[in-house]
C-alpha cells in the first residue's frame, strides 16, 4: 500500500477559488478586521498570511493593532465598536493575547454573525442548538476534508481526536458528536491512548506534542490528520516546525495523511475566508 500525502496548499487554492467566486456575488466586497494585541512573532506571520489570502479572493481585510499597555478595556472597547460598525462584516481576535488576559471574554465580545472564527460562547450555543453560525475554521476544514475530499460519511465513523483545545480539539469533538461520529476523545490523562487510537479509522492529532503519534498508535489503513505545529530546533540549530505525528515510519502503514506543515494550515485559511464570504447567507 502506498500512503497518499495530502497537498494542502493545492487543495487550499481550490477552496480559495470557490471563495473568490462567492465574494463576487456580494454587492460590495466584505470587510474583515483582524484585531491583534502586541507583537507576537507567530501571530504577526499568521495575520500577514490571512491578509494576503483575503486580498487574493477580493475580501477587504485589515489589521487593527493595539498596544498591550492600553489594557483589556481598550480591546473590549474596540471590539464593541467593530460589532456596531455596519461596514465591518467579520471580526477576528488574533490569539494569543498577552499573558493573564481573558481570551474567552474577548472572543465573546464579537457577535455571532461577525464571529468568523466561531469561537465565542454565543456561536457555541447556536451550534449546539442547530442554529446558523460560523464553524471554527480548522474543525470545519477537517470535516470538509473528511466528507468532501476523502469521501467519509460521518455517522458511525470511528474517529479519535487527540487534544481538547479551545480552537481545534473541543469544537471538533462537539461537531463530530453532533453529526453522529463514533468519537474517541483522548486527553492528557486518558489511559492507554495508543490502544484506543488503534481502534479508530481516522486519527486527528491536535495536542501540540511534537511526534507524539507514532506507527504504534495506528491501525493499518488508517487516515491521519496532523494539526500540530510546534517550533523546534533541529540538530543543526535551525528552527523547524514539527507536527504531532511522527511521520517517518508511516509510509505503507496508513492510507492517507496530512503533512505538517503544508496540510491543514492552508485549508484553515481558506475555510476562514469561506466563513467571511458566507456571512450574507446566514439568515437572522
Image (cartoon, rainbow, N blue to C red):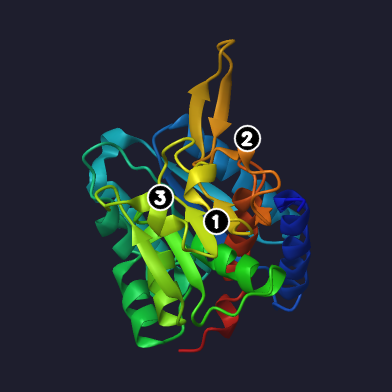
Instruction: Please state the horizontal and vertical placement of residue 181, each as a whole percent of the image.
Output: 46, 77
Of badges 3 and 2, the one in the foreground is 3
Q: Nearer the viewer, residue 108 or 198?
A: 198
Residue 66 appears in the rendering = yes
Residue 248's tag is 2
Q: Quadrant of the C terminus?
A: bottom left
Mark 3: few/some/many CA within 10 Å (<14, 14-19, 20+): some
Look at the numbered disc 1 and give the secondary structure of its residue: loop
Mark 1: few/some/many CA within 10 Å (<14, 14-19, 20+): some
User: What is the C-alpha distance between the residues marked 3 and 1?
Assistant: 10 Å
Look at the numbered disc 3 and give the secondary structure of its residue: helix
Apparent side of residue 196 relative to residue 106 in the rendered image (left or right): right
Task: Name which quarter of the figure residue 173 lies in.
Answer: bottom left
Task: Name which quarter of the figure residue 237 lies in.
Answer: top right
Q: Image point 58% across, 54% down: which residue?
A: 224
Residue 147's tag is none
State which tag comes first along the sequence, 3 or 1.
3
Q: Image point 36% across, 35% down: which residue?
A: 67
User: What is the C-alpha distance between the residues marked 2 and 1?
Assistant: 16 Å
Q: Nearer the viewer, residue 206 or 22?
A: 206
> Which residue bears the numbered disc 1?
219
Instruction: Please state the horizontal and vertical placement of residue 202, each as a whole percent of the image.
Output: 54, 62
State which tag comes first along the sequence, 3 or 2.
3
Look at the numbered disc 2 and give the secondary structure of its residue: helix
> Which residue bears the numbered disc 3?
194
Instruction: Please state the horizontal and vertical placement of residue 189, each as a whole percent of the image.
Output: 24, 49
Mark 2 touches mark 1? (CB < 8 Å): no
Amino acid at each position: 500500500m502506498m500512503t497518499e500525502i495530502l497537498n494542502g496548499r493545492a487543495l487550499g487554492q481550490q477552496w480559495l477559488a470557490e471563495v473568490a467566486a462567492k465574494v463576487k456575488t456580494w454587492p460590495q466586497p466584505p470587510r474583515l478586521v483582524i484585531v491583534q494585541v502586541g507583537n507576537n512573532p507567530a501571530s504577526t506571520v499568521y495575520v500577514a498570511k490571512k491578509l494576503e489570502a483575503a486580498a487574493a479572493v477580493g475580501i477587504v481585510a485589515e489589521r487593527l493593532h493595539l498596544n498591550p499597555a492600553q489594557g483589556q478595556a481598550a480591546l473590549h472597547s474596540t471590539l464593541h465598536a467593530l460589532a456596531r460598525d455596519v461596514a465591518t462584516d467579520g471580526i477576528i481576535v488574533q490569539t494569543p493575547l498577552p499573558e493573564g488576559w481573558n481570551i474567552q471574554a474577548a472572543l465573546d465580545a464579537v457577535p455571532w454573525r461577525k464571529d468568523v472564527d466561531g469561537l465565542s460562547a454565543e456561536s457555541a450555543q447556536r451550534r449546539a442548538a442547530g442554529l446558523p453560525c460560523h464553524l471554527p475554521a480548522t474543525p470545519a476544514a477537517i470535516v470538509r476534508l473528511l466528507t468532501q475530499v476523502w469521501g467519509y460519511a460521518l455517522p458511525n465513523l470511528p474517529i479519535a481526536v487527540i487534544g481538547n483545545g479551545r480552537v481545534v480539539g473541543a469544537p471538533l469533538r462537539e461537531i463530530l458528536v453532533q453529526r453522529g461520529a463514533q468519537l474517541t476523545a483522548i486527553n492528557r490523562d486518558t489511559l492507554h491512548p495508543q490502544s484506543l487510537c488503534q481502534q479508530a479509522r481516522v486519527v486527528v492529532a491536535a495536542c501540540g506534542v511534537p511526534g507524539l503519534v507514532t506507527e504504534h498508535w495506528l491501525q493499518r489503513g488508517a487516515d491521519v490528520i496532523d494539526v500540530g505545529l510546534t517550533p523546534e530546533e533541529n540538530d543543526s540549530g535551525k528552527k523547524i516546525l514539527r507536527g504531532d505525528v511522527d511521520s517517518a515510519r508511516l509510509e505503507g502503514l496508513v492510507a492517507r495523511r496530512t503533512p505538517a506543515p503544508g496540510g491543514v494550515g492552508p485549508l484553515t485559511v481558506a475555510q476562514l475566508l469561506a466563513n467571511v464570504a458566507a456571512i450574507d447567507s446566514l439568515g437572522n
